[in-house]
Image: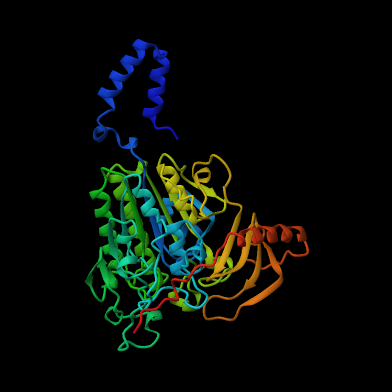
């Protein structure tokens, strides 16, 4: 993707036919026209990146993904002006490991950011994202990017694990899930109720490394995140920036501000989602108003599938099977929307397989930053899909629950070696031979295809074996606890 000024340089060179006089004239023209870097046009600098990450949002929870009562006009507009993905995956069916994968471009089993016994980090956790990992923010800073994180971090709450110690210049948000630090004075099960009380959740709100409010006023979290994100964009509009915006909602307990509370036909869950949708619209409008839209890639997705056992306060996976905590499609296949006016063609539907880990590799590649070569990077470059220059660079996907590989996808086929329902609903069941599904024919994973495609199982087994040979055992960060 050559910038117009680069093309013009080459046109001038061809016109002057590279003669000695021509070269002299060219360099005088270049020095007087383009040499003053700060005065050059916006497109001469690397593009900006904005990643907006919802929490526990299901595949079927947006209007543009078929929900009949959730109103998401801004995300629907984002999809209409950009590209909507049908086969976009999180790297884990739960919060902490999925966020670690996005930030590192690596399966959580490689960084120790997963566990078979403790699914996520808690306020008593002593672990967090290892210092040895190269975050997306750290990679982009090598190219001069200003970096900001606004929202739920959940990669470690101790000082050494905070965003400001892992490549971000600025942080505003909560360090872990909003249902944690529930006070004993509150009723049992309050987090899933339709009338939770802010004062019963002692979650800290932080600016950089300082707690500025505790408990955080969760009724205005989405609003405050939006204000901080807009402020970050405006403050840093003269230089390349990366904004990571991991929303708190629609994770339980659900809260919404006065402008949205009680307004959605979908109830409290809809109130929270529709306020997140409003926030997305505010970010997109800010980019347009500040003249940054044509130089900014915005991507919206979710960390994992809907928390189905929460019933009315949980979301929907649409036609996909199961939800958060499972390696069925509903647990890990997410909404994915890319927006970049003038670069990503509007109104496109992308059926190529891709992942949150691919955002890591794609952003670094587009920015011209180095991708670490001293470790396995599971993310691939999504540029062929985004810019419609070729097929997906991804043909395989590996579904982990904690530290254990449960399923493998190759092309349209998916083989389950172990199945287990979403959290709180049943035990693990191994399968030998694995259960095979064709996700193109049957995205709901209801029709077993073992008898029809026996040769496919052999190919998937080869892919599984080759993958496992690249996985080395590392210490789990999630199993470390603060000593009493």
Q: Could you tell whether 165 is left or right of 375 in the image?
A: left
| Colour scheme of the picture | rainbow
Q: Is residue 264 visible to the viewer in this orientation of the structure?
A: no
Report x, y in % for residue 183.
Answer: 31, 85
Q: Nearer the viewer, residue 81 or 17?
A: 17
Tell how many labels: 0
Q: Please, is residue 15 above or below residue 461 in the view?
A: above
Q: Nearer the viewer, residue 23 or 401?
A: 23
On the image, which quarter does residue 15 sit in? top left
Residue at x 31% of width, y 65% of height: 222
Report x, y in % for residue 104.
Answer: 44, 57
Report x, y in % for residue 317.
Answer: 52, 67
Q: Nearer the viewer, residue 468 or 430?
A: 468
Q: Please, is residue 346 above or below residue 115 in the view?
A: above
Quadrant location of the C terminus?
bottom left
Report x, y in % for residue 197.
Answer: 30, 80
Q: Is residue 450 visible to the viewer in this orientation of the structure?
A: yes
Residue at x 35% of width, y 82% of height: 483
Q: Please, is residue 289 above or below residue 271 in the view?
A: above
On the image, which quarter does residue 46 sit in? top left
Q: Could you tell whether 400 is left or right of 81 in the image?
A: right
């Amino acid at each position: 993707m050559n910038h117009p000024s680069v093309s013009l340089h080459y046109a001038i060179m061809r016109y002057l036919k590279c003669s000695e006089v021509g070269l002299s004239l060219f360099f005088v023209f270049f020095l007087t026209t383009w040499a003053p870097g700060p005065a050059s046009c916006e497109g001469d600098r690397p593009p900006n990146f904005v990643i907006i990450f919802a929490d526990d949002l299901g595949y079927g929870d947006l209007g543009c993904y078929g929900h009949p009562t959730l109103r998401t006009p801004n995300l629907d507009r984002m999809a209409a002006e950009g590209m909507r993905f049908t086969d976009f995956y999180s790297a884990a069916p739960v919060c902490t490991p999925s966020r670690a994968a996005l930030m590192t471009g690596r399966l959580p089993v490689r960084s120790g950011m997963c566990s078979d016994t403790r699914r996520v980090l808690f306020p008593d956790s002593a672990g967090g994202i290892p210092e040895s990992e190269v975050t997306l923010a750290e990679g982009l800073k090598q190219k001069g990017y200003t970096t900001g994180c606004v929202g739920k971090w959940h990669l470690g709450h101790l000082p050494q694990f905070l965003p400001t110690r892992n490549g971000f210049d600025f942080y505003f948000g909560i360090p872990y899930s909003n249902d944690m630090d529930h006070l004993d004075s509150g009723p049992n099960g309050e987090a899933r109720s339709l009338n939770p009380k802010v004062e019963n959740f002692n979650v800290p709100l932080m600016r950089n490394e300082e707690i500025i409010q505790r408990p955080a006023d969760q009724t205005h979290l989405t609003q405050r995140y939006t204000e901080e994100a807009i402020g970050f964009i405006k403050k840093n509009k003269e230089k390349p920036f990366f904004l990571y915006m991991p929303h708190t909602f629609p994770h339980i307990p659900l809260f919404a501000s006065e402008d949205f509370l009680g307004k959605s036909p979908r109830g409290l869950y809809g109130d929270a989602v529709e306020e997140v949708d409003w926030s997305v619209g505010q970010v997109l409008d800010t980019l347009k108003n500040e003249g940054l839209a044509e130089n900014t890639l915005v991507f919206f997705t979710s960390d994992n599938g809907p928390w189905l056992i929460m019933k009315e306060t949980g979301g929907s996976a649409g036609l996909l099977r199961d939800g958060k905590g499972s390696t069925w499609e509903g647990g890990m296949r997410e909404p994915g929307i890319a927006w970049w006016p003038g670069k990503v063609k509007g109104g496109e539907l992308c059926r190529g397989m891709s992942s949150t880990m691919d955002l890591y590799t794609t952003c670094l590649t587009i920015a011209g930053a180095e991708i670490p070569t001293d470790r396995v990077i599971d993310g691939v470059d999504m540029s062929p899909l985004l810019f419609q220059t070729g097929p997906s660079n991804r043909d395989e996907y590996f579904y982990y629950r904690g530290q254990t590989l449960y399923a493998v996808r190759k092309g349209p086929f998916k083989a389950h070696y172990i199945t287990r329902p979403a959290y709180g609903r049943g035990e693990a069941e191994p399968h030998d031979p694995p259960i095979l599904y064709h996700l193109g024919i049957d995205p709901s994973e209801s029709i077993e295809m073992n008898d029809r495609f026996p040769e496919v199982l052999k190919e998937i087994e080869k892919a599984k074996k080759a993958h496992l040979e690249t996985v080395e055992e590392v210490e789990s960060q999630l199993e470390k606890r603060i000593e009493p």
